[in-house]
Image (cartoon, rainbow, N blue to C red):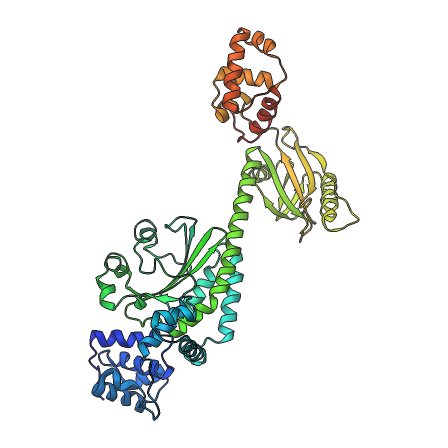
């Protein structure tokens, strides 16, 4: 057979549609792939046969059929019996409408055929898709990918291992998961297979509104060839300006829905010299949709909890209080920045490996007893933990560090590990003045801040006026301004607000 069969652009497009259609028979898909491969210059019948699991004789037979009869020559010979009354175009439309979520009554009305015929065609096509060996995805493959998906949620960069695995399985050149917050078209996070796309920044800032699959039904797996011909793709500005830079012509995608206010979009992409995505990849991705939704939910929960943890850590750090979470044996599990700063000084306490150690062996023993008692109190019903304080002397002669040991999960119903929480206060840590704090927090003037501090210390207006050398009326005017800026109307509220708010500011030296 002559090498390099000539295929027109329209024939190539039709062949690709056959390959990508979920209702094409396995045999017709194989023949179409054979012809597409035969259109490559210097294509070898032997190589094509090996690639698609056919004999050389079979490859040459379909090459001959195509050369003589074009695409019609790839169809099976007509069998005896009554001809079909509903052609393949209408049958494909019925299947597409069913995939989009329309019920049989709506499809029947749209296609102007009976509802029973629609139901029969959908049953036949669904059965056909499920049974074709080329379209089916083996259970072990799905199980392995699902396991990779959920295990990768615990990685430092979640899902990277999974995205790399599915990229390999589907023979894709790129694989991404994009997330969008509520009412935001611009993606706020783009997860990839570990190697960020060179064009990720351009996509986020410029091209995210122009992509081919920007508005697709949730849960429906599609490719850009479902909507556009090769000519339309190449003429599109998004392709010319962006995708062509990276050689991308084939994209498969599914929108997995919105979870906890975050929506996710899954995308696979291939270079133009490779085949378009077919039934195998569609079936695989469709099987993964419920797992992707569950994983997105867990991922969002993890991000939310991390944000809450970071906010709490920042608050405690702002108060210059060191926080160390340790296990039953004093092994450090977590430590915030103020605690790490104290430990790095190695002045009275430090880390030996991952274990907290004091300079004085006797006090070390006391510390471990407190840790064990508070840690055991979490999971043992008969044991109660109790916070205890210790003073840690410093060999340098500086003022001692205050150390308080308490339960690591006090009040939690779900505790999986016995832990204790240690708080450290370093008196040498510089602190912001209350006057500066009130100015920074509430926009008070220096004079107003001094009045507020005096009142919060329990002094009356007359005492405050006398101490500042001003009249009572002037002081009352300052008080009205202070109450307006702080959103309060009583001195008791002022005291509480000053004490709470100042404690939340970062400590720094203003001397």
Relative side of 46 to 374, left or right: left
Relative side of 92 to 368, left or right: left
Can residue 2 be seen from the camera position used here? no
Towards the viewer: 323 or 221: 221
Towards the viewer: 102 or 12: 102
Task: Identify which residue is drawn at 27% across, 81% down.
Answer: 35
* Rendered view: 298 above or below 121: above
Q: How many marks?
A: 0
Towards the viewer: 79 or 248: 79
* Rendered view: 219 above or below 202: below
Q: Residue 292: horizontal and vertical position, in percent?
A: 48, 62
Residue 132 occupies quadrant: bottom left
Q: Residue furthest right?
A: 382
Task: Identify which residue is drawn at 58% across, 7% down.
Answer: 466
Task: Identify which residue is drawn at 51% across, 50% down.
Answer: 303
Q: Residue 379: horizontal and vertical position, in percent?
A: 73, 51
Task: Identify which residue is drawn at 71% across, 38% down.
Answer: 360
* Rendered view: 185 above or below 282: above
Relative side of 51 to 69, left or right: right
């Amino acid at each position: 057979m002559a090498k390099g069969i000539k295929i027109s652009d329209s024939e190539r497009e039709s062949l690709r549609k056959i390959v990508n259609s979920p209702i094409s028979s396995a045999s017709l898909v194989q023949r179409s792939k054979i012809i597409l491969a035969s259109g490559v210059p210097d294509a070898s019948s032997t190589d094509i046969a090996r690639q698609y699991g056919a004999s050389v004789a079979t490859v040459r037979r379909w090459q001959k059929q195509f050369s003589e009869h074009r695409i019609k020559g790839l169809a099976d010979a007509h069998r005896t019996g009554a001809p079909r009354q509903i052609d393949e175009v209408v049958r494909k439309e019925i299947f597409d409408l069913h995939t989009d979520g329309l019920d049989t009554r709506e499809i029947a009305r749209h296609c102007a055929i009976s509802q029973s015929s629609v139901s029969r065609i959908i049953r036949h096509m669904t059965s056909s898709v499920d049974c074709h060996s080329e379209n089916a995805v083996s259970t072990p493959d799905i199980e392995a990918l699902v396991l990779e998906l959920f295990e990768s949620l615990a990685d430092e960069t979640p899902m990277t291992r999974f995205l790399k695995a599915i990229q390999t399985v589907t023979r894709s050149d790129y694989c991404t998961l994009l997330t969008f917050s509520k009412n935001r078209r611009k993606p706020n996070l783009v997860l990839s297979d570990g190697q960020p796309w060179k064009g990720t920044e351009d996509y986020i800032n410029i091209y995210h509104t122009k992509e081919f699959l920007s508005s697709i039904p949730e849960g429906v797996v599609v490719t850009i060839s479902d909507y556009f011909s090769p000519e339309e793709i190449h003429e599109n500005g998004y392709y010319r300006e962006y995708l062509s830079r990276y050689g991308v012509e084939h994209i498969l995608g599914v929108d997995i829905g919105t979870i906890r206010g975050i929506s996710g979009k899954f995308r696979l992409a291939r270079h133009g010299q490779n085949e378009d995505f077919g039934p195998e990849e569609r079936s695989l991705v469709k099987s993964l949709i419920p797992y992707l939704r569950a994983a997105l939910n867990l991922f969002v929960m993890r991000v939310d909890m991390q944000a809450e943890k970071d906010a709490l850590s920042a608050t405690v750090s702002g108060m210059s209080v060191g926080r160390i979470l340790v296990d039953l044996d004093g092994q450090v599990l977590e430590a915030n920045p103020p605690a790490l700063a104290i430990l790095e000084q190695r002045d009275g306490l430090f880390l030996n490996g991952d274990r907290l150690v004091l300079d004085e062996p006797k006090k070390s023993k006391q510390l471990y007893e407190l840790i064990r008692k508070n840690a055991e109190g979490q999971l043992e019903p008969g044991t109660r933990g109790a916070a205890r304080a210790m003073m840690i002397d410093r060999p340098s002669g500086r003022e001692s560090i205050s150390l308080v040991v308490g339960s690591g999960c006090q009040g939690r119903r779900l505790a999986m590990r016995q832990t204790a929480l240690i708080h450290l206060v370093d008196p040498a840590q510089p602190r912001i003045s209350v006057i500066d704090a009130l100015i920074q927090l509430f926009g008070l003037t220096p004079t107003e801040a001094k009045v507020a501090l005096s009142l919060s210390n329990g002094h009356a207006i007359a005492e405050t006026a006398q101490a500042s050398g001003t009249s009572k009326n002037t002081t009352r005017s300052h008080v009205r301004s202070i109450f307006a800026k702080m959103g309060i109307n009583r001195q008791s509220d002022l005291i509480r607000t000053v004490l709470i708010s100042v404690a939340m500011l970062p400590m720094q030296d203003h001397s």
